[in-house]
Image (spheres, grey):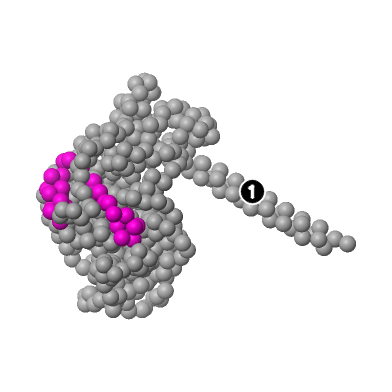
Amino acid sequence: MNIFGIRGGAKVSGRKELTAETPVEKLPMPRLLHVPLQQHVGSPAVPIVSVGSRVKKGQLIAESKGAVSAPVHAPTSGFVTRIGNHLAPHPSGLPVLTLSMEPDGRDEWCKLPEPLELETASPKEIAERVSEAGVVGMGGAAFPSAVKLSMGDKYDLDSLILNGAECEPYLTCDDRLMRERADETIIGTRYMMKALGVSKAYIAIEDNKPASFKSMQVAAGENSGIEVVYVPARYPMGSSAHLVQAITGRETPASGRTADLGVIVNNVATAFAVYEACKLGRPLISRIVTLSGEAVKRPANYEVLVGTPASDLMKQSGGLIEEPKQLLMGGPMMGQPLPNLDIPIVKGTSGILALRGTEIPEQNIMPCIGCGSCVTVCPAGLLPMEMMNRLDHEDVDGADEIGLRDCISCGSCNYVCPSHIPLVQFFNYGKGRLKEQDTDKARHVKIKVLTEAREKRLEKRAP
């Protein structure tokens, strides 16, 4: 198909050769599992088991709370040893309620729900099953997938796009998934299409992954409504707005959603999780994770139970060659720095990177030279250097006026800046300030409404 022109983006060093040809290995059962109850956007799940309880694999251990939330299930059978805030640091670096359990070695499944037949299942039934299985976006955003799959009720949708671009350097978990589990991923895609009420789906794969492209194309077959398409290998091709523009030619408006354009975007690993939930009745309790970086003795791709300490992956790979300069969860462009390897793998963990100093050389920050490189690569069409200048002068509202909220924090501007200015850090700081302002405004509005209501009640009571 014709790929439309796209704005911005940077050519980055992929470093995928470290693990691209490494088939997925199943990680041995951990001695302990630490399962955070906040693994998704929205409200944390609420535990429904107690310390000392024996649970079975796949059993519900924490219920979703609120409209945007996701339940959590036991990754294996065993005993709950602790429920607390500080036993296992969350990947965000913030304390989070965590359920710890000791596997009993039996790996005994609980009774699973009956499979949903694609031909007879209704869109509502598919969305409900996905919700019950705790499926979230597997590309890193971790947005509860059932919410997206229910958007056909509110939006006039015509297409589903599955992100198989995997544009972050080092990561190859999606590449291996598409090579090794293409049939299952395509079945999951069909369930998602039915839930959304769309007859067309595109699976977008960067043009540097020919093996994945061929595997998915064979699995999709002909005349299925699913088209496997190449997109340019350019970062951040995996962003929703980028994919929609590249494939459909439609440009997502500022502060808008791709759903406004009739398109829903999901990750290929999410489609596989939907397959497991609908076809097998299994909740989301494991995922493929890339362990990479030159500090790792044997980089590899692992299928990992949620709650597994990242240190277990490192031990399986022979440990570290040397003390890493930086540890990251996710890719080097948008990943989160880690204090250590005691953190647990969660549903949104695509990779664990241990990078040597040669991979992230020291870079001294220098004054902006006004070269405009950041403007050229910005996929959102923003003016990064001007936003940075305003934030540097604490003019948060001024930065907001020229598009701060539309920044996707992809790091392209950081990557190309010859002065090594940490632009994204400025923007994340600014967005945090905006969020504080929005919260304060909402609080003031609520107080005003309550005060006015109280005054009206007093007026009615007055003689």
- Residue at the disc numbered 1: 444
Outermost residue, front side: 223
Q: Quadrant of residue 415?
A: top left
Image quadrant for the C terminus? bottom right
Image spot of residue 278 (x, y percent):
28, 67
Q: In this view, does 449 lie above or below 253?
A: below
Span highlighted in magenta in the image = 193-219
Q: Nearer the viewer, residue 373 or 195?
A: 195
Image spot of residue 92 (x, y percent):
38, 52
Q: In this view, does 344 lie to the left or right of 105?
A: right
Q: In this view, does 38 lie to the left or right of 288?
A: right
Image quadrant for the N terminus? top left
Image spot of residue 202 (x, y percent):
25, 49
Q: Magenta segment: does it hold 194?
A: yes
Q: Which of 189 and 235 is in front in this view?
A: 189
Residue at the (41%, 29%) spot, across then down: 383
Residue at the (44%, 68%) spot, across then down: 46
Outermost residue, right side: 463
Residue type at numbered disc 1: His
Residue at the (51%, 41%) spot, across then down: 433
Residue 203 shows in the view: yes
User: How many marks on residues?
Assistant: 1
